[in-house]
């Protein structure tokens, strides 16, 4: 078992390196934007940031595997004891449009235990979250924990449902969850799950179509804060394409409504 305190220090240093690339480019608004094959936007900053992070991992953690959104994975990503899973900019559309809600997601996944450590660095929000299983979750160095709201009828819900929920026949189910909550907002991307971790939101329902690098860093933070982050069927799965996070108190109720 690796020393996760040392890996957290390393992950925070990766976040520092990422912020040094992303924030000045965001502030200066000087970057090219391309469309990927899946018709989503990618900037040269997404690609460049991932390169910076992976170069450091390859140099300082040569015995670890790596997997990123823009440049693929190392050959041993399925077999290595530890794999770094990186989304260089989560919320690229916000980054492009000048909305400060974007972050670098850094997850460390253990071959058997799944995600054990996560860092979410949102420098334009002057906010960084991190969490290590068994060692708590933090926001800008302060311990955080999920809320103690006990029921969906009392809950603040953040939801960023997309048309893929419709394609899997769940529009009515999503509508039912929305109507059952006390208050509904949409905080988008990584942010809604971090708001769950810090107790500002009680449950978050993400879009369908997520990738492992959208989720890996988030799971340990939400879990270390005392919450749950599962797929739409209630299973903890960093390779799932859906993400529901909550304070845990009524998670199963939400899953039941989505699977009914
Ligand atoms: C996107 C965000 C978003 C999710 C999309 C992702 P990107 O990531 O994670 O919340 O709904 O499916 O593609 O492209 O901004 O890194
Ligand atoms: Ca993403
Ligand atoms: Ca991304």
Image (cartoon, helix red, strand yellow):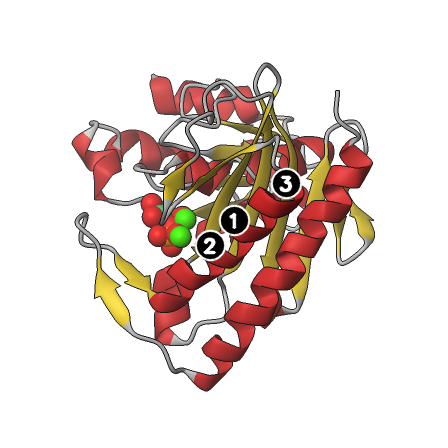
Residue 201 visible in rendering:
no
Considering only vertical position in the picture, is 229 above or below 188?
above
Residue occupying the point 26% across, 29% down: 170
Closer-to-camera residue (9/216): 9
Helix, strand or loop under label 1: helix
Q: Report the disc number at residue 54.
A: 1
Residue wearing tag 3 = 118
Q: Earlier in the sequence, mark 3 or mark 2?
A: 2
Q: CA distance from mark 1 to mark 2?
A: 6 Å
Q: Report the disc number at residue 88.
A: none
Q: Residues within 10 Å of mark 3 (few under 14, many from 20)?
A: many
Q: Earlier in the sequence, mark 1 or mark 3?
A: 1
* 135 displayed left or right of 39: right
Helix, strand or loop under label 2: helix
Residue occupying the point 73% across, 29% down: 133
State if disc 2 and disc 1 touch (CB < 8 Å). yes
Residue wearing tag 2 = 50
Q: CA distance from mark 1 to mark 3?
A: 16 Å
Position of residue 199 measured from the top left corner of the image (x, y, whole percent): 69, 46
Mark nearer the viewer, 3 or 2: 2
Question: As drawn, which residue projects farthest toward the bottom?
Answer: 28
Closer-to-camera residue (72/169): 72
Residue occupying the point 50% across, 18% down: 79
Q: Residues within 10 Å of mark 2 (few under 14, many from 20)?
A: many
Position of residue 85 measured from the top left corner of the image (x, y, whole percent): 51, 38
Position of residue 259 measured from the top left corner of the image (x, y, whole percent): 35, 18
State if disc 2 and disc 3 touch (CB < 8 Å). no
Closer-to-camera residue (66/30): 66
């Amino acid at each position: 078992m690796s020393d996760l305190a040392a890996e957290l220090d390393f992950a925070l240093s990766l976040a520092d390196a990422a912020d040094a690339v992303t924030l000045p480019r965001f502030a200066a608004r000087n970057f090219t934007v391309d469309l990927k094959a899946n018709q989503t936007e990618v900037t040269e900053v997404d690609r460049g940031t991932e390169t910076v992070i992976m170069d450091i991992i390859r140099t300082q953690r040569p015995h670890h595997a790596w997997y990123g959104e823009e440049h693929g994975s190392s050959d041993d990503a399925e077999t290595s004891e530890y794999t770094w899973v990186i989304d260089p900019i989560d919320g690229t559309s916000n980054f492009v449009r000048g909305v400060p809600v974007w972050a670098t997601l850094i997850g460390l996944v253990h071959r058997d235990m799944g995600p054990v450590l996560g860092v979410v660095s949102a420098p334009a929000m002057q906010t960084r979250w991190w969490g290590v299983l068994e060692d708590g979750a933090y926001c800008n160095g302060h311990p955080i924990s999920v809320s103690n709201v006990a029921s969906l009828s009392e809950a603040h819900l953040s939801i960023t449902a997309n048309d893929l929920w419709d394609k899997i026949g769940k529009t009515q189910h999503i509508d039912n969850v929305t109507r059952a909550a006390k208050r509904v907002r949409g905080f988008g991307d990584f942010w809604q799950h971090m708001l769950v971790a810090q107790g500002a939101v009680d449950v978050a329902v993400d879009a369908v179509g997520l990738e492992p690098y959208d989720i890996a860093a988030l799971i340990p933070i939400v879990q270390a804060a005392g919450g749950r982050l599962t797929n739409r069927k209630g299973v903890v799965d960093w390779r799932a394409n859906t993400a529901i996070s909550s304070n845990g108190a009524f998670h199963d109720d939400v899953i039941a409504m989505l699977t009914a």
